[in-house]
Amino acid sequence: MVRKGIDAHGHAIVGFRDGWRGPLENAYDELTIESTRGILPRGGTILRSSRTNPFKHDAGPERIAENMRSLNLDGLIAIGGEDTLGAAARLHGEHGLPVVGVPKTIDNDLGGTDMTFGFDTAVQIATEAIDRLHTTAESHNRVMLVEVMGRHAGWIALYSGLAGGADVILIPERPFDIEEVVRLIRRRHSRGRFFSIVVVAEGATPREGTLERSESARPGLSPEVAAGSGGKDEFGHERLGGIGQLLEREIGARTGYDTRATVLGHIQRGGTPTAFDRVLATRLGLAAIDAAHDRRWGVMPALIGTRIELVPLGEAVSKLRLVPPEEYAAAAAFFG
């Protein structure tokens, strides 16, 4: 994006630091061909990120607009997921700021695009972890629980579980029955397979009335949040965690099988991106800088099939892209 913006279009480009905090506080670095050279194989972002919501700060949109004017910027390219691009859509739609969005989230839950970059890398990391846990599970006759990221959407759990040969996959879109989970694990044992792999998304929850639990052990919430100490970010999201440990206790108690939980957490977000993600990010970046050059504001480049197309930013963030029932049903054929 930077290289084409400079070489092909003759633009000067700055990068705001720390997500939306940068344009709010006018914190930025100039982005040049030299300063961005060699970043393709690096995960994360050289500009860093934050959970800053510009609409939670006094006169946030006005401050962003003023800082853009002070730097003589023609427009802003926002790269992120539902929260980052949701704010970008509001800045464009409600305040008329010239914005282009780029879909980047490991959860793969943005509407308007078939895939976001970051997702393929997260799935690869989770799959490799599941592959490694197979060894311990089989050697020690254990049930191994693997908790992966996924607040509202279970794409990482579904794809890594399928690729890693999981025996049960639990996702936020489909509340689970603990007795059904136990039945599948017991059936597997009855067939002479004395170990099991259960992949669970952090946002997965039990079906109402199927799992008695205390408020201090609510699945999906970290202990301090469950205890009522707060913990919401500026976009209103609570920090998730704990479903793996809850299931470890429940499955172990109900089956008598040795059960252990592993939480991958932020391991999924780091490291070297896959070749697919590198290519996808490059294609989306090129489309974004072209859209900005052509002053096509309020759009988002998206992967539609195998092509990159521009879609309205407001529509792209209007709803989450969730795992459809038929895709989960296909995976369920391999459970137990």
Image: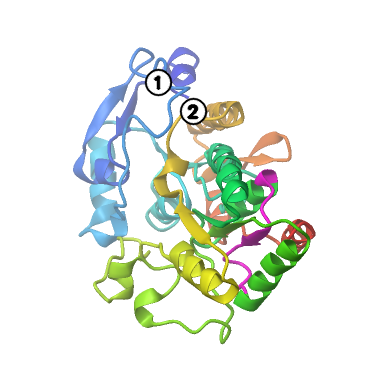
What is the secondary structure assignment of the residue under circle 1? loop
Residue 251 highlighted magenta (yes or no): no
Q: Which residues are magenta?
A: 163-176
Residue 194 occupies quadrant: bottom right
Task: Answer whether labels 2 and 1 touch (C-beta < 8 Å).
Answer: yes
Q: Is residue 196 above or below residue 48?
A: below
Residue 241 occupies quadrant: bottom left
Q: Position of residue 278 (x, y in %)?
A: 55, 27
State the residue position of label 1. Answer: 11
Q: Position of residue 17 (x, y in %)?
A: 27, 36
Q: Position of residue 331 (x, y in %)?
A: 74, 56
* Three-letter code for the amino acid on which mark 2 is drawn: His
Counting residues from the start of the chain, the first of labels 2 and 1 encountered is 1
Q: Which label is found at residue 69? A: none
Q: Residue at x 63, y 48 (%)?
A: 138
State the residue position of label 2. Answer: 293
Residue 179 or 322: which is nearer the viewer?
179
